[in-house]
Image: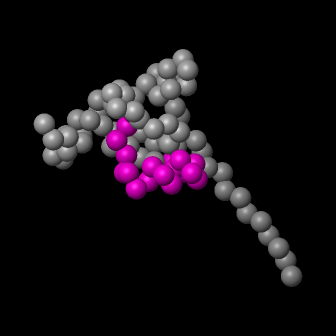
Amino acid sequence: MSTSTTTKTIERPEVSETDRTDDDTPKFFHYVNKDKIAESAVLGTFVLALCGEVFPVTRQAKPGSPVCPECKEIYESFGGGGA
């Protein structure tokens, strides 16, 4: 009986240094599918933001946190955001 093991390399997307502040806090928080947030936080899977940014969830936005302008514009174009 033969046992084989395979591995898969997952490339990490490039992260722009301008997306983070000096204390490792994201510069902007992005809009992502809320059903994927907990999965990403627990399993480390990557999420896709409305603006196309791909990243693992490591922080939760607090009220008043800076929001990615591109995500906000896309979200509002779908009728989100109230106002």
Q: Position of residue 10 (x, y in %)?
A: 61, 49
Location of residue 8 with respect to 24 vertically, above or below: below
Residue at the image point whose x is 60% and y is 45% from the top:
11
Location of residue 70 with respect to 32 vertically, above or below: above
Task: Determine if residue 6 is in view.
Answer: yes
Figure quadrant of residue 24: top right
Quarter of the image for the C terminus: give it.
top left
The segment highlighted magenta reads 29-46
Residue at the image point whose x is 51% and y is 50% from the top:
40
Of 45 and 25, the residue lying toward us: 25
- Which residue lies most toward the right here? 1
Task: Determine if residue 52 is in view.
Answer: no
Q: For this view, does 61 lie left or right of residue 12?
A: left
Residue at the image point whose x is 66% and y is 56% from the top:
8
- Which residue lies most toward the top here? 22
> Is residue 61 rendered magenta in the image?
no
